Amino acid sequence: ATMSLLMFALSACGKAQKREPNADVEEDTYVYIPEELEMQNASETIWAGNVRMFNHALYYKSYKWDEETQTDSTEIVKYDPVDGTTQTMMARSGEGGVQDFALDSNSNIYLLLSIWKYDEETGEEQTTYLLEKYSVDGEAVYQIDITDELVENGEHMYVQEFAADAQGRLYLGMDNHVKLHDEQGEYAGDADIPADWITSLCTDGDGKVYAEYWDTMGSNNQYAMSEIDFVGKKMSNTYHGVPTGNTLTFENNTVFLAHDSSTLYRYDCSTEQSEILTKWLDCDLNGEYVNGVLPLDDENLIVVVNDWEAGTTQVVRLTKTLATQVAKKQEITIATIYEDQNLQEAAVAFNKKSQDYRIRIKCYIDNNSEWSDTTYSDAITRLNSDLVSKDNAPDLIDLSSVEEEKLVSKNVLEDLTTYLKQSDKLSEGDFIEGILDKYRVDGVLTGIPRTVSLITFVGKSSVVGQRDGWSVEDMMQMADAFPNAEIYSGGEKTHMMYYFLMMNESQFIDGKTGKCSFDSPEFIKMLEFVNRFPDEIDWQNYDRNVDKFQENKVLLDSAYLSDFREIQVYEARFGEPVTFIGFPTVDGSAGHAMTAEGRYGIVTSSAHKEAAWSFLESYLTEEARYDWGFPVTKNRLNTMVEESTKPNYVYDENGEIMLDENGEPMEWSSGSVSMDGWSYDYHTPTSEEVELTLKLLQKAMPVSEGLSDAVINIIQEEAAAYFQSQKSVEEVADIIQNRLQNYMNESM
């Protein structure tokens, strides 16, 4: 599809303006000031993909469609960031898609193409792969067919990276090797890398090509980079400690730039050390969309921002500026475990609007660092430590991974009820009935989600009944009635224990006092029931054929509901009416688990509470492009219902609704789901399906998202002795009670 190159006006911080001196920063501290650049004579039907930098100019691939001739073409366009002009260096029309392009030191252009053909008579498909070279004047030099090289035993190998060196030799990066082609485009052999996959290829100032990869062969377990020895067909001059696996751009022969979704780094090969140049949020940019970072000179960088959701390209110049010359803004820190696209987009929008405050996102898990068994728990520990510290406490906190009862008891979180009462943008009446009460802890509204989703158990009504909720004893009775059936699809001991604790944790741990009751009859029954499930499942050979559900060989499945279409799948899967019965609970109440997206709380020790609330207001009220689940505000949920239940009819050339063979109006498919050979096409949700979904959401309760790893680990460790018949269930329950009570006493 044709994409548009749309240019947006940057906020005031991206334009030159008079700034009062900032005396609160060190004199030698620098920041990068953004300024959006114009592209003169740029076509309005351009998407700047596959960006390259050469001789301080930007090159990109542009796809164009001519409506009049019904033909497409691909251009390689040169953009001069100094004078803003664009120039088409070569154009290729006709069949075939340009997968990637590269440049050598003489500005010759190389294309990697894949041409797909379908023979209607034979029904056969065929893909041809080509290498093409064009001179600096756009004249064709050679065309080489490399299909045999990329297709082995009918399998097509995907070229992940494409580069050219100074001599015009080509490098095709595959999973764990690089295919080499000489100056004439002929295949010259393979160079293997010391890893499982290549993350990028890049060319330095001398025209040498490097491969970057995740180094698992040595003891480093980090990103590394090696020069590709074309003649020797091997890697040489390896450098370790590369900060990220994204596309690299050399500043000179030894220094290059690298970036991830939050940060821009500079890496020096001579020292194998990296430094942080800037955070994207500090430049009012969403790092999720940064496609390339290109050095222009010592003071300026060019950043290409491809918003793949909107189909737009933005070119921004970052100018290195003394921090003392930049107007000071107060910083609001949001603490979170993982990066989040909605949060980053909201932060960029807030930073552009606010004259006084700037959002900073602090992620406690670095996606570029080596992961271990304790990565997550270590991040939680650091976060909890910062929350109660005097100097490192954030202003806002992502509540998805914390123990809120404990934080409320220590007066760490603000009650958002007060802020709602004072707000002129939001009120409690704006939210769907009862949703705010679900997120109150001891009367404190700790956070408000943007969206919520539902997880529950579902089974045939003829098997589980039509009740709304059940106990462990009820579930055991159902299992006893079908002794040869699998109780839950793919259920393992660890899996089922987590489900039980997810809905019943408060029955065994008093979050306010820390008192435990894991030696209770209810917990013992849970252990006994969990022991009915296998220790592990051979997932490679596990059969999830839909017949197992319909023939009562599998009694229960998990239902994940995040929109109004999904509820219809389960009746089709079981082949008859179903009941969304929920997870078993101690008291037999409805065990539908509600999960929240985008729920943040204000930290009591924050010095910027009103500004933090101002950000939350905009976050909860403004549209987001990556919402997953059901909105919690009435107007957005009503809009979702209206859009979901509106049929998308198929119309003929006269604008009339087309009818199927039964005389019924035809609708466009709204998607499908498949599982082990079985598939289901969604229909437009009926009013009954919408009503049932809303009913389940109304009864669902938030799960303890901060369920401690330590609690789970202690239970799993000690329960193993019972599962392996080494100790009685009562003995194990006593040990779990003792260990967890000690743990809670120490952590309260």
Image (spheres, rainbow, N blue to C red):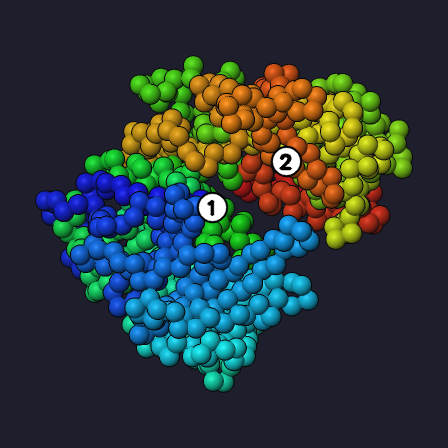
Q: Judging from the image, what secondary structure is the residue with disc 2 in?
A: strand
Task: State the image coordinates of residue 587 (x, y, percent, origin top left).
Answer: 71, 22
Q: Is residue 729 visible?
A: no
The image shows residue 136, relative to residue 687, as above or below, that is below
Q: Is residue 619 visible?
A: yes
User: Circle 1: is it few (<14), some (14-19), or many (20+) Cα within 10 Å?
Assistant: some
Three-letter code for the amino acid on which mark 1 is drawn: Tyr
What residue is at 62 percent from the left and 66 percent from the top? 151
Q: Give left or right: position of 539 versus 398.
A: right
Task: State the image coordinates of residue 474 (x, y, percent, origin top left).
Answer: 80, 25
Q: Nearer the viewer, residue 71 or 226?
A: 71
Label 2: which residue? 672
What residue is at 14 percent from the left and 47 percent from the top? 16
The answer to whether mark 1 and mark 2 are in CB contact below 8 A is: no
| Sequence-earlier tag: 1 or 2 | 1
Residue 407: assigned label: none
Position of the N terminus, as image quadrant, is top left
Residue 338: assigned label: 1
How many circles with numbers are drawn on the protein? 2
What residue is at 35 percent from the left and 22 percent from the top? 419
